[in-house]
Image (cartoon, helix red, strand yellow):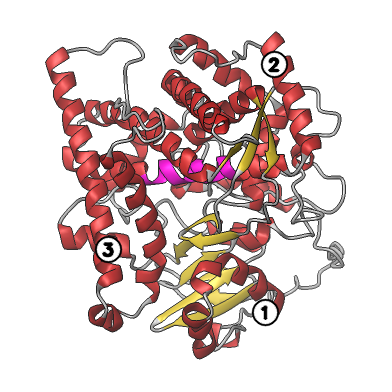
């Protein structure tokens, strides 16, 4: 997502990558007059392995595969190898579960990569006559313009820190709410922290997008029906996207309830966003020039004369992305830290030291000024273990477990196969990020694998070469890509990292987090994004 992530640099890095295990490098060709070795002729998709259409459909619809798409990546790689095909009705998908092959696809996707041939999100926009945002606009000047403006406001180094003041205030409200909730339980348990973090995500992203305060984190029971409805709508869209995509259109016409509920949820999100955009635009027009630091994404788009209809589309999609993605990652981070007391203690020591020496505030005040909050955010971004905890959480639980791409207007070579134009390709990030060749003990939570050897305070960067620091096994920069890469990478990456760093820091400075007594293992599930398959409840013990 960072502008510094450019594919040519990644490609150069790949050329220096170690060979695959057990496959020696080819010996150098001697300077003789003999002809160079021929490149083997690529094979066609007819020769590519994969399940039968009937078996694949049965797995998806009859065995709960729609909720286990991340696990199906791992099983597919184990059964068929790094490349396999699967057909669902008329759609043929090529699955790629090897970092070097993921890199090969991304290097050939062009300046305006397409996400998918068709999508229920785009169908909703067409049906309702509402504009799409970055997530649904296919290509063209509208997409380029929106991407350019949002990248300038959110992705350039230091841009996200402009929103550190609002985020710090919302984090302080979240910590105060956790304190109230833990006092209600005799053992300090806060039930279903994911719900609380959804409220945090909605409050924070609404301030960033619209400069709106919703009151999501007040006393339990104070949240309005509108804000709770937004959270339910976000959940409904994510839960029903794969269902409406998987079910054949004739079946959806016979049983329209999933499609109707999906469209209703999007309608609610658009109505919410439109109301707040209109309020903000009118408010700015009435007040005149804004004070320094008083800005939001709506203002950024309006200043660039983006049509108001495009502002509606972009902020609605950013609203959905900003609620669930941060909430899930924050919940998984605390869940793993609660089960890894050594890692939690080490991170607490790092945070305490930073509080004393590096300008990190303890977050006690809900009215931290913008400059102080920005300095705190910058200092947190330089803490190696804090960053490593977030990276390791996103490796284990990538918010987007797979990315879809459509081959551009020419055939491309992927491994030993020639993939025809207009073929849908699925990049299996969940499978690559749990590959033991690149991540020893791949199912274990080990933040230290992201630290450099004898770390001197420098943090692992977000530039090419950002790879785990384990001394065991080879490394590959494309093995874990939680924010994607290139023109379609996550435009909100820096903002998400800022929220995660600030929230984790203040929570862990105030509380020691432990597993719920008697609580079982929580597994992930796919609901478009990767989410906890059951509520996560944790004990929060005041330090």
Q: CB of mark 2 within 8 Å of CB of mark 1?
A: no
Horizontal and vertical percent position of residue 136: 32, 54
Helix, strand or loop for disc 2: helix
Calculate the distance from the C-alpha at mark 2 to the C-alpha at mark 1: 48 Å
Which residues, given as a range, are shown in magenta? 320-331
**Is residue 324 a member of the stretch shown in magenta?**
yes
Q: As displayed, is residue 35 above or below residue 495?
A: below
Residue receiving disc 1: 80
Horizontal and vertical percent position of residue 508: 65, 27
Residue nearest the viewer, comparing 198 with 391: 198
**Residue extending furthest front?**
186
Residue receiving disc 2: 354
- Give the residue displayed 57% in from the left and 43% down from the top: 331
- Give the residue displayed 19% in from the left and 40% down from the top: 274
Residue receiving disc 3: 261
Q: As displayed, is residue 521 above or below residue 120?
A: above
Q: CB of mark 1 within 8 Å of CB of mark 3?
A: no
Name the front one of labels 2 and 1: 2
Horizontal and vertical percent position of residue 46: 55, 87
Helix, strand or loop for disc 1: helix
Which of disc 3 and disc 1 is earlier in sequence?
1
> Left or right: 221 with respect to 516?
left
Name the front one of labels 3 and 2: 3
């Amino acid at each position: 997502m960072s502008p510094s992530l450019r594919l040519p640099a990644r490609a150069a890095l790949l050329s220096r990558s170690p060979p695959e295990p057990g496959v020696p490098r080819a010996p150098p060709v001697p300077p003789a007059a003999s002809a160079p070795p021929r490149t083997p002729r690529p094979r066609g998709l007819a020769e590519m392995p994969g399940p039968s259409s009937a078996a694949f459909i049965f797995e998806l619809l009859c065995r709960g595969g729609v909720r286990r798409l991340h696990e199906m990546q791992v099983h597919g790689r184990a059964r068929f190898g790094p490349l396999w095909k699967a057909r669902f009705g008329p759609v043929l998908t090529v699955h790629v579960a090897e970092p070097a092959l993921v890199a090969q696809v991304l290097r050939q996707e062009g300046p305006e990569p397409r996400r998918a041939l068709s999508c229920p999100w785009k169908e909703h926009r067409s049906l309702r006559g509402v504009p799409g945002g970055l997530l649904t606009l296919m290509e063209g000047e509208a997409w380029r313009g929106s991407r350019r403006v949002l990248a300038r406001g959110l992705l350039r180094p230091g841009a996200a820190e402009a929103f550190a003041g609002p985020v710090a205030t919302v984090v302080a409200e979240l910590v105060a709410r956790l304190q109230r909730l833990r006092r209600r339980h005799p053992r300090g348990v806060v039930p279903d922290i994911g719900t609380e973090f959804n409220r945090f995500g909605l409050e924070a992203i609404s301030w960033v997008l619209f400069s709106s305060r919703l009151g999501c984190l007040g006393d339990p029971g104070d949240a309005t029906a509108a804000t709770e409805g937004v959270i339910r709508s976000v959940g409904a869209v994510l839960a029903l996207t794969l269902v409406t995509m998987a079910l054949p259109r004739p079946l959806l016409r016979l049983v329209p309830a999933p499609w109707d509920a999906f469209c209703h949820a999007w309608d609610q999100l658009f109505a919410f966003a439109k109301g707040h955009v209109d309020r903000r635009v009118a408010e700015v027009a009435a007040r005149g020039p804004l004070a320094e630091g008083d800005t939001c994404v709506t203002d950024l788009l309006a200043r660039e004369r983006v049509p108001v209809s495009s502002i509606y589309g972009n902020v609605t999609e950013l609203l959905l992305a900003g609620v669930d993605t941060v909430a899930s990652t924050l919940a998984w981070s605390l869940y793993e830290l609660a089960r890894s007391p050594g890692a939690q203690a080490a991170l607490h020591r790092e945070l305490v030291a930073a509080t004393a020496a590096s300008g990190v505030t303890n977050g006690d005040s809900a009215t931290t000024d913008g400059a102080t909050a920005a300095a705190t955010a910058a200092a947190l971004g330089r803490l190696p273990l804090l960053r490593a905890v977030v990276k390791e959480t996103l490796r284990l639980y990538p918010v987007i477990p797979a990315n879809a791409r459509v081959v551009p207007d020419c055939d491309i070579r992927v491994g030993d196969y020639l993939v025809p134009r207009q073929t849908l390709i699925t990049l299996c990030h969940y499978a690559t990020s749990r590959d033991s060749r690149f991540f020893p003990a791949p199912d274990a939570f080990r933040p230290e694998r992201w630290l450099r050897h004898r770390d001197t305070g420098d943090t692992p960067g977000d530039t090419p070469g950002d790879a785990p620091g384990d001394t065991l096994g080879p490394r590959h920069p494309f093995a874990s890509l939680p924010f994607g890469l290139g023109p379609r990478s996550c435009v909100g990456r820096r903002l998400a990292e800022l929220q995660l760093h600030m929230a984790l820091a203040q929570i862990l400075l105030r509380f020691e987090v432990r597993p719920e007594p008697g609580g079982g293992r929580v597994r992930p599930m796919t609901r478009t994004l990767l989410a906890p398959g059951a509520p996560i409840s944790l004990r929060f013990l005041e330090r």
